[in-house]
């Protein structure tokens, strides 16, 4: 296989794994989302730490980041955003809101367009503005017709969008950056587990129990698609990488709708239709730019 084919395969496998995440986290529905998040963070830090130790180049990058107070604060803020994103996502999945969660990841590329405009002085073209307007219309339709704010999708889109904003300013790559962020969160996760234990809400009983093994593997499951996607992104054109992003929320939507039989209101169908049209308009614009 050529480098390009391996890159495409790696990126697609990563997106499919992310899309199937709801099935994995659903297996831990009996565990408090905060506990699942805490184990996910700790074991992800352990797994990525092994990758860092195995690479002298990664060790050099990490030591430079951890020795810089500004970089630490930068990554600490990013870690807070990704932790909030993970917590809301896990809560949504175990409480039968997989479709609502998929909305957040459908919206996130368009949120990034807006953040680029406000924070990086990027100037979206007419097609991108049309896409943003259509997506905003979709959200407004959902709110007006149903009378309910889709807070899960909006929270996931906002936290992921701002996380991407901070990662764009970071000097570390995706793997090194996530390791630093999960490492910085370890003290907070330990406090969270102690709080759950003090309130008799801790599910962890035996290291070889089914839930305990799944929680430990959650870190591995989190890190593997990131490694695959990072490998794929290096070999793919930016436009193709951007379009593959839609694979994840599409699978999530289908899992929630067809696998878990989550209901979709008429307002949601109209809202999603506007957002899908917006993504189509946005994708056509990206494709045109890459052809020039």
Image (spheres, helix red, strand yellow):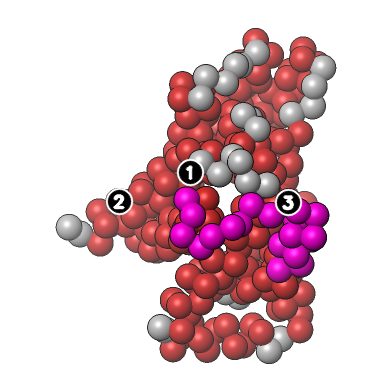
Taking the image as shown, residue 210 lies to the left or right of residue 108, namely left
Question: Is residue 207 on the magenta stretch?
Answer: yes
Which residue is the site of mark 1?
24
- Frontmost of labels 3 and 2 is 3
Q: How far is disc 3 from disc 2 in space, using C-alphas? A: 41 Å
Question: What residue do we see at 57% from left, 83% from top?
Answer: 62
Callout 2: helix, strand or loop?
Answer: helix
**What's the magenta region?**
190-210
Question: What residue do we see at 46% from left, 33% from top?
Answer: 251
Can you give x and y, in whole percent of width and height, for residue 59 in the image? 51, 86
Q: How far is disc 1 from disc 2 in space, using C-alphas? A: 22 Å
Would residue 160 be visible to someone looking at this image?
no
Which badge, 1 or 3, comes first in the chain's sequence? 1
Can you give x and y, in whole percent of width and height, for residue 234 in the image? 39, 63
Callout 3: helix, strand or loop?
Answer: loop
Label 2 packing within 10 angstroms: few (<14), some (14-19), many (20+) = some
- Frontmost of labels 1 and 3 is 3
Does residue 242 lie above or below 217 as drawn? above
In this view of the protein, which residue sits in the foreground, 105 or 54? 54
Give the label on residue 201, or none: 3
Taking the image as shown, residue 5 lies to the left or right of residue 79, namely left
In this view of the protein, which residue sits in the foreground, 120 or 197? 197
Label 1 packing within 10 angstroms: few (<14), some (14-19), many (20+) = some
Question: What residue do we see at 53% from left, 56% from top?
Answer: 212
Can you give x and y, in whole percent of width and height, for residue 44 in the image? 53, 65
In this view of the protein, which residue sits in the foreground, 263 or 125? 263
């Amino acid at each position: 296989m050529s480098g390009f084919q391996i890159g495409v395969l790696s990126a697609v496998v990563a997106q499919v794994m992310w899309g199937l995440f709801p099935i994995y986290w659903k297996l831990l529905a009996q565990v408090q989302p905060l506990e699942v998040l805490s184990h996910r963070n700790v074991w992800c830090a352990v797994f990525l730490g092994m990758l860092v130790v195995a690479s002298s180049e990664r060790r050099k990058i990490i030591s430079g980041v951890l020795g810089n107070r500004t970089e630490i604060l930068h990554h600490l803020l990013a870690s807070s955003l990704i932790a909030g994103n993970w917590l809301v996502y896990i809560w949504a999945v175990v409480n039968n809101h997989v479709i609502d969660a998929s909305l957040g990841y459908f919206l996130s590329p368009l949120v990034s367009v807006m953040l680029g405009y406000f924070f990086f002085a990027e100037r979206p073209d007419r097609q991108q503005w049309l896409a943003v307007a259509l997506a905003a219309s979709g959200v407004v339709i959902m709110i007006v017709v149903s009378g309910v704010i889709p807070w899960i999708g909006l929270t996931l889109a906002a936290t992921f969008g701002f996380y991407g904003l901070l990662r764009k300013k970071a000097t570390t790559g995706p793997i090194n950056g996530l390791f630093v962020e999960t490492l910085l969160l370890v003290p907070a996760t330990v406090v969270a587990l102690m709080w759950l234990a003090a309130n008799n809400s801790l599910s962890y009983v035996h290291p070889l129990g089914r839930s305990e093994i799944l929680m430990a593997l959650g870190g591995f499951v989190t890190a593997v698609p990131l490694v695959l996607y990072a490998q794929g992104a290096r070999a793919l054109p930016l436009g193709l990488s951007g379009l593959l992003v839609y694979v994840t929320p599409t699978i999530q939507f289908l899992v929630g709708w067809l696998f878990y039989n989550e209901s979709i209101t008429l307002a949601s169908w109209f809202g999603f239709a506007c957002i899908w049209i917006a993504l189509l308009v946005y994708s056509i614009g990206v494709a045109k730019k890459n052809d020039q």
